[in-house]
Amino acid sequence: MSRPEHTLTRLVACWAAVIVLCLPALAETSVPDRESREVGNALFWQAVIPATANSPGRFGAHYKTRVVIFNPTSRDYTITARLYNANGQARQSEIEIDADEYLVWDNFLEAVFDYRGGGAVWLRADDEGDLFYMTAEVYTDSDNGRFSTTVVSGIIPTFVSSSQPDFNAGINANRNRRTNIGVWNWETRPSSVEAKVFNASGALLQTIRFDLKAEAWQQKNISASVSDGLVRWEINGESKTHYFYAVEVDNKSNDGTLNWSVNGSTGSVGGGDIGESRQTEDCAVGSVIEAGGECNLTSGGSTVGRFTVDGNSRGCLRIEGLTLCSETGHNYNATRLNQYTVTFVASKRDDGSWEITMHSISG
């Protein structure tokens, strides 16, 4: 497949020196060494952009998606990019990126996929050692300048891997603001999702239904008038693995704010009868986590994260905003992850479940 059209900037010697000085651990250390230090970067071999656009909007806007990908390693490799819309996977393209190179697209969907519309994008490198850093924003230009919505700021958003409800809080859809809500079904099974919109007093205002095909993406607007309200996502279909988000946009400037959904796994959620308590067992040596299941990661009696297994049997370690995913196994021994020292060893079994064989967290 030919290389996609894009705005390409190579790191020549003088710029490479600056990058190396700023990020010595990225450019000079091996992958295991990087994992053992405190994680302050966001390097992944696969990543998702759950909301992208190349389409017209209200008040004369045309929304585009700007994406930057940086390969800080000493290896050349290929990233496979897949685009998903309401019908499932719509496009696929190969992105070749050299060692110490970064690529910039001001209209990613147009340049990489020759596509107009919206959707979710999944990027996957050849190997787990082919790490990259990524940012993404949806923006529109106007006479008053550029207004943008940050989608990925180097930290990759995490998926919801359960049938329990998720929430977006502080939602506004009124004369000053409008809100679109979106969902991407991660699995190869169909999904049925309801987004229930409540006002600040806990009264139900609107129910928005998403009937999703396998791997399909949809976005819809909230038509009810609401200020500082809440969206409760309820999963009813075969698939249990999703990305949920809400985008709130100013009606005058088209400036937007994107919020990922929050999970209620560690306690009860307020708002009258909106929230429900949810009990999840703590991770322990010998725990077996089935596909679609999870357990709490604890330190000193407090929950600091979760280990989840999605419908495709991919295991993800999630600690304080950091997400580390693998399709085969995790092997961290006294590894510094954010402010915690983590020992966590788990591997996928033949039946797709994961077994934890070592587990301790301090910090």
Image (tube, helix red, strand yellow):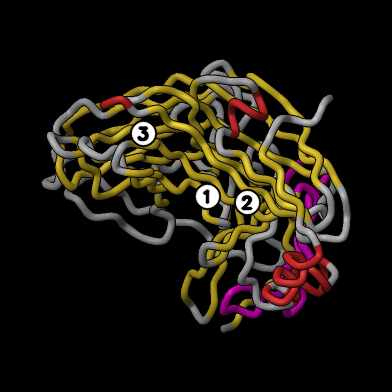
Image quadrant in which you'd find residue 221: top left
Nearer the observer, 299 or 177: 177
Was residue 343 drawn as part of the magenta stretch in this picture? yes
Whether residues under marks 3 and 2 lie with C-beta atoms below 8 angstroms apart, the answer is no
Residue tagged by mark 2?
134
Q: Position of residue 37 (x, y in %)?
A: 71, 78
**Closer to the camera, 268 or 8?**
8
Quadrant housing the N terminus: top right
- Residue contact at pointers 1 and 3, CB within 8 angstroms: no
Tell me which amino acid carries mark 1: Val
Q: Earlier in the sequence, mark 1 or mark 3?
A: 1
Would residue 35 be seen by someone viewing this image from the given angle?
no
Label 2 to label 1: alpha-carbon separation: 7 Å
Question: Residue tagged by mark 1?
Answer: 152
Looking at the rendered structure, the kind of residue marked 3 is Ile
Q: Is residue 106 visible?
A: yes
Q: Which residues are magenta?
A: 327-353
Q: Is residue 207 left or right of residue 259?
A: left
299 sits left or right of 16 in the view: left
Quickly name the residue at label 3. 181
Residue shown at the point (71%, 51%) measured from the top left: 102
**Count of numbered badges drawn on the protein:** 3
Mark 2 residue element = strand
Element at badge 3? strand
